[in-house]
């Protein structure tokens, strides 16, 4: 499977769509891709989604047709790109990886569509950020596999239809609600990726540790999993930080005590919350009496942008039951007040 990526915004235009093969990648990239699962067998979690995809893949292979277009949505770090690459491996096809911000001009999306071969997978990350023109170029490409191109000037303007090979588009987004309905309706398979359970993350951590040659026991892996906020990307990052701590402070072996000490130093608490999460909860409690408070106000008070709060912090805080989204803004839950001993006048009143 060749991976062609223009994901990386700091590449020059010329370099943007070049093929990247395993041999050509930098040390860091190949290191990262080493820990990425390549087959469903290696991919831990998302079991309902995997079952659906396996059936779709088998059917597509039997019918000798490309897979239907697929939309993955859910919080960042849950493995949307990884899953797209797994699908490509399982289908035995190539995948081109890009993101909507890299497809700013019509020629960007036209170029990438015209470079596809039959059966290829085109992965577009952050697909909700595609502009209207690029979206409209995608519609006939997704539906009937052709591009509508205009040539000539003013009165002699002509539209020609250029066929393109049958391909599969895999779109990924953290905000399914921001996708326009014509685009959303063109995906045959739409699936939400769920946060991982502690057990699943423990398995991810043990797998990653094995690949990185890091010694870790079951309890050590569980300690890291508990603080990884349901997200394998965070779990894999924490394994490396805990490994560094274990090398410096002991013999490199990660048990529960070593993991807990390392994560305490990183100021990640037993719920997986970091300083920003705790600050966010404190602001709602102290400045806004437990809420509700509007997201813009919250973002200003926290010094973060709205998108980061909505995409990165909020989904996990909601999933853990610490905050509630209401039409009037964000509110602390009684559970959050109990866990963090937070002041929350409204909630406390409602408790009695
Ligand atoms: N590394 C990151 N995500 C993973 C997953 N879902 N399964 C196994 N290893 C992973």
Image (tube, rainbow, N blue to C red):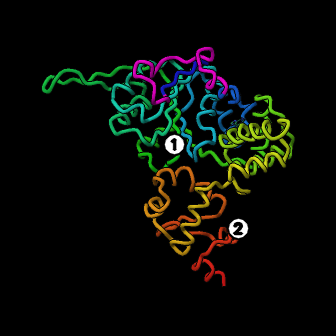
Residue at the spot of label 1: 173
Residue 339: numbered disc: 2
Q: Quadrant of residue 14?
A: top left
Horizontal arrangement in the rendering, residue 280 relative to residue 37 (left or right): left
Q: Position of residue 94 (x, y in %)?
A: 57, 20
Classify residue 209 as left or right of residue 152: right
Please check the rendered image and state whether residue 346 is part of the magenta-colored stretch, yes or no: no
Side of 163 relative to 216 (left or right): left
Density class for disc 2 (Cα within 10 Å; few <14, some 14-19, many ≥20) is few
State the quadrant of the N terminus. Answer: top right
Magenta span of residues: 7-31
Which structural element holds mark 2?
helix
* Circle 1 residues within 10 Å: few <14, some 14–19, many ≥20: many
Residue 271 in sight: yes
Compared to residue 70, the image places residue 34 above or below, namely: above
Q: Position of residue 330 (x, y in %)?
A: 52, 66
Q: Position of residue 149 (x, y in %)?
A: 29, 24
Q: Which secondary structure lies at badge 1?
A: strand
**Cβ atoms under marks 2 and 1 closer than 8 Å:** no
Q: Nearer the viewer, mark 2 or mark 1?
A: 2
Which residue is located at x 65 percent, y 63 percent? 321
């Amino acid at each position: 499977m060749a991976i062609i990526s223009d994901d990386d915004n700091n590449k020059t235009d010329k370099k943007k769509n070049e093929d990247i093969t395993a041999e050509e990648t930098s040390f860091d990239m190949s290191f990262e891709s080493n820990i990425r699962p390549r087959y469903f067998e290696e991919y831990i979690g998302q079991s309902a989604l995997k079952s659906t995809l396996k059936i779709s893949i088998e059917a597509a292979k039997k019918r000798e047709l490309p897979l239907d277009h697929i939309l993955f949505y859910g919080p960042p770090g849950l493995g949307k790109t990884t899953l797209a690459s797994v699908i490509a491996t399982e289908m035995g096809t190539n995948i081109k990886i890009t993101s909507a911000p890299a497809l700013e001009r019509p020629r960007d999306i036209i170029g990438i569509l015209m470079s596809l071969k039959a059966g290829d997978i085109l992965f577009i990350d952050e697909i909700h950020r595609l502009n209207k023109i690029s979206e409209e170029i995608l519609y006939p490409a997704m539906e009937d596999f052709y591009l509508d191109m205009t040539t000539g000037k003013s009165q002699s303007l002509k539209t020609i239809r250029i066929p393109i090979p049958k391909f599969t588009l895999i779109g990924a987004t953290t905000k399914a609600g921001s996708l326009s309905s014509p685009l959303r309706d063109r995906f045959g398979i739409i699936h939400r990726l769920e946060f991982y359970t502690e057990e699943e993350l423990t398995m991810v951590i043990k797998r990653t540790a094995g690949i990185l040659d890091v010694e870790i026991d079951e309890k050590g892996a569980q300690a890291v999993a508990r603080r990884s906020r349901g997200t394998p990307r965070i779990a894999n990052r924490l394994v490396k930080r805990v490994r560094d701590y274990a090398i410096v402070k002991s013999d490199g072996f990660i048990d529960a005590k070593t993991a807990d000490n390392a994560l305490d130093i990183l100021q990640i608490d037993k719920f997986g919350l970091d300083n920003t999460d705790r600050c966010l909860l404190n602001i709602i409690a102290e400045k806004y009496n437990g809420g509700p408070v509007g997201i813009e106000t919250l973002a200003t008070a926290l010094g973060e942008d709205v998108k980061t709060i909505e995409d990165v912090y909020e989904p996990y805080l909601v999933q853990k039951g610490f905050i509630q989204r209401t039409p009037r803004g964000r509110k602390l839950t009684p559970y959050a007040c109990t866990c963090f001993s937070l002041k929350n006048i409204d909630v406390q009143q409602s408790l009695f």
